[in-house]
Image (cartoon, rainbow, N blue to C red):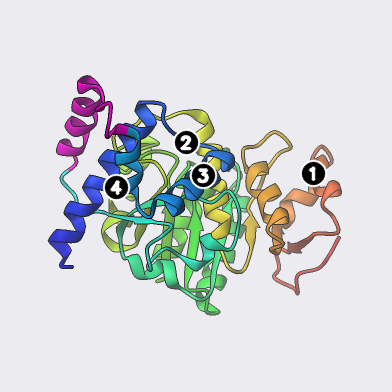
Amino acid sequence: MNLEESSDKSRRIAWMHAVLVMSKKIGIGSAKANDDLKRKIIDAGSVERLYEEYFAMFPVEEDIAKKVSDKLDKFKFSFLAITCVDKDYPEKLKAFPGTPAIIYVRGDQELLRCKKSIAFVGTRELDNLSHRDHGERVVKRLVSTGYDVVVSGLALGSDTLGHCAAIKFGGRTIAVLGTPLDVSYPKENKRLQEEIGVEHLLVSEYPIGVGSFGSYFANRNRTTVALATEGVVVARAGDKSGTQYAIRICIEQSKQLYILENNIKEPSYEWVGKYKDKLKVIREDFDASYNI
């Protein structure tokens, strides 16, 4: 199958996936919905056959079909849809429950097969200069010591720092989106999202044609952590930060959790004590990481 054929097939899969969601035939945006869809696709053999099972007798509503088609028509960039029954579906995602049954990728698909990757995540409010400086130096060291890819979620603050530092120091990066590929969010990162889509890799579990909801952003942490073979680095995160999703999933997936030293200096951060036996602290002076 050539590139043009792959792109056409991917658009058909995205259309069918979005129509299934919009018609409320399948769920989306949660670990349970992902596992349910995996089972359905495996049982049917493909997304195409699953679509036929639902709509062979009663065709999809015309307004839903048109709405999804219009959004796909407006998205002019090539992308690939990779399903859980495809040979290119990442082993990293197969290894854990709750990961997406279908991913949509734009950019360098080879990054999905990298051997050594790590997630860099944290709060959007990364305002302290010393925290940002430490985070950037950590990413620089990761890139220089052989980590192939830095994975994050393209949010403002810590995620943005992780992506930008990886690019700045000659590394590669994967941005796992909480929206379909046609949505630029946050708007402040539109240019960065475009750069990653051209030079690195964008990944989304949400087909073009569906809306965006808060739960989508929480669930994308499962994909972010699953794609990070070497664990997760937390730049900074309070007890109510959305980063807590990534922290819990990291523990759930039995991966190493690293935190920058600033987190243990905050007496109000109860989560640090909760996971003290599970994490390692990266000191500002880069002495060997130590347990609390």
How many neighbours does mark 2 have within 10 angstroms: few (below 14), some (14-19), or many (20 or more)? Answer: many
Magenta region: 55-75
For the residue labelled by badge 4, is the local secondary structure a helix, a strand or a loop?
A: helix
Please say if the residues under marks 4 and 2 sit with CB atoms less than 8 Å apart: no
Mark 4 belongs to which amino acid? Glu
Q: Which of 57 and 97 is in front in this view?
A: 57
Count of residue discs: 4
- Residue 48 image label: 4
For the residue labelled by badge 2, is the local secondary structure a helix, a strand or a loop?
A: loop
For the residue labelled by badge 3, is the local secondary structure a helix, a strand or a loop?
A: helix
Mark 2 belongs to which amino acid? Ile
Say whether residue 20 is magenta: no
Q: Say left or right for 181 vs 140.
A: left
Q: In which quarter of the image is residue 167?
A: bottom left
Which residue is under mark 2?
A: 28
Q: Position of residue 226 (x, y in %)?
A: 56, 58
Mark 1 belongs to which amino acid? Trp
How many neighbours does mark 4 have within 10 angstroms: few (below 14), some (14-19), or many (20 or more)? Answer: some
- The residue mark sitting in front, 1 or 4, is 4
Which residue is under mark 3?
A: 34
From the image, give the main secondary structure of the stretch colored magenta: helix
Dot 3 or dot 1, earlier in sequence: 3
- Residue shown at 25%/54% (left/top)? 79
Whole-angstrom CA distance, mark 2 to mark 1, is 29 Å
Whole-angstrom CA distance, mark 2 to mark 3, is 7 Å
Which residue is under mark 1?
A: 271
- Residue shown at 37%/67% (left/top)? 88
Q: Say left or right for 229 vs 17.
A: right
